[in-house]
Image (tube, rainbow, N blue to C red):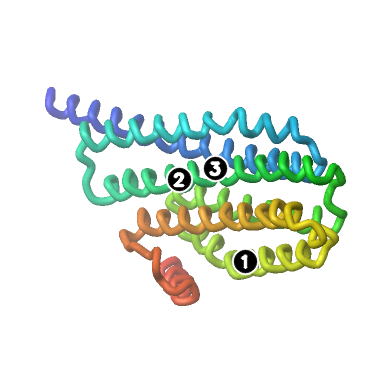
Amino acid sequence: MINQERSGHIVRAYDQELARLCNLVLEMKTRVLDQTREALTALLQPDPNAARTVLHREPGIDTLSMEADEEIFIVIAKRQPTAIDLRQVLAISKVVTDLERAGDHAASMAYSAIRLHEITREPPPPALTQALEHLFDTGRQMLEQAVAALSEADLEQAIAVFEREADFHQQVLDTRDAILDSTYAQSPRALAELLAIPHALKRLGNHGANIAEQAVYVCQGDDVRYRNRELLIDALRQATQA
């Protein structure tokens, strides 16, 4: 009886530790998206003070990353998880790194917003503004779906992220071409700063795809990081229908 009670206590404690880890990931995701949204808005308005606020808040994501790393160390050291539990912990470790890097890209956007404001105080034309907004929205959806796929062990949402990738990358190229064809091309400095924005937003979507790969790893135990996307989508579709 005592052993059963102790075992039950350990399981409950382990579940609580995993829940804390998942909550940290969700909070990091929310902060990353907020930071990216605010950095883009600071560039489009333009508003250098708002960009500086993004930079001031950026260390908060690093703090969450360090808290998650500490929680991961505690779980592995104390619980010695096996099989799917270990996969989940290892996947979360990689996801934390992706989210931390996504936060860095938001900060780089804020720096570009400040430097672009020093060159020209005019906001981008409506067509470019719309293209960048659309690019952010797609990257945001990919990141949100990927984190949901991981936290809910949902292959369908991971597949949805992979299916968005090709169109998303085409959006990046189209936005880059629109910037090159705009009046910003007349100023090399302004052009460089604005071209950095679709690159940073592309990384947002790429991190979402990386996280979706970790969701597949948790669900199926397969490392799919270097798999052909079309073949992977077909294989996952078959797995969900089996």
Q: Earlier in the sequence, mark 1 or mark 2?
A: 2
Q: Earlier in the sequence, mark 1 or mark 3?
A: 3
Residue, x 60% and y 64% (percent of image)?
164
| On-image quarter of the N terminus | top left
Secondary structure of the residue carrying tag 1 is: helix
Residue, x 69% and y 41% (percent of image)?
39
Q: Which residue is mark 1?
A: 169
Residue, x 78% and y 40% (percent of image)?
118
Q: Earlier in the sequence, mark 2 or mark 3?
A: 3
Q: Which residue is mark 2?
A: 151
| 152 relative to 180 in the view: left or right | left
Image x and y of residue 208, in percent: 53, 54
Q: Amino acid at mark 1?
A: His
**What is the CA distance from the residue labelled 2 to the residue labelled 3?**
23 Å
Q: Nearer the viewer, mark 1 or mark 2?
A: 1
Secondary structure of the residue carrying tag 3 is: helix
Q: Nearer the viewer, mark 2 or mark 3?
A: 3
Image x and y of residue 52, in percent: 68, 31
Q: Amino acid at mark 3?
A: Asp
Residue, x 46% and y 53% (percent of image)?
211
| On-image quarter of the C terminus | bottom left
- Which disc number belongs to residue 104? 3
Camera-nearest residue between 70 and 173? 173
Image x and y of residue 153, in percent: 43, 51
Crowd band around label 1 with a 10 angstrom C-alpha radius: few (<14), some (14–19), many (20+): some
Q: Amino acid at mark 2?
A: Ser
**What is the CA distance from the residue labelled 1 to the residue labelled 3?**
20 Å
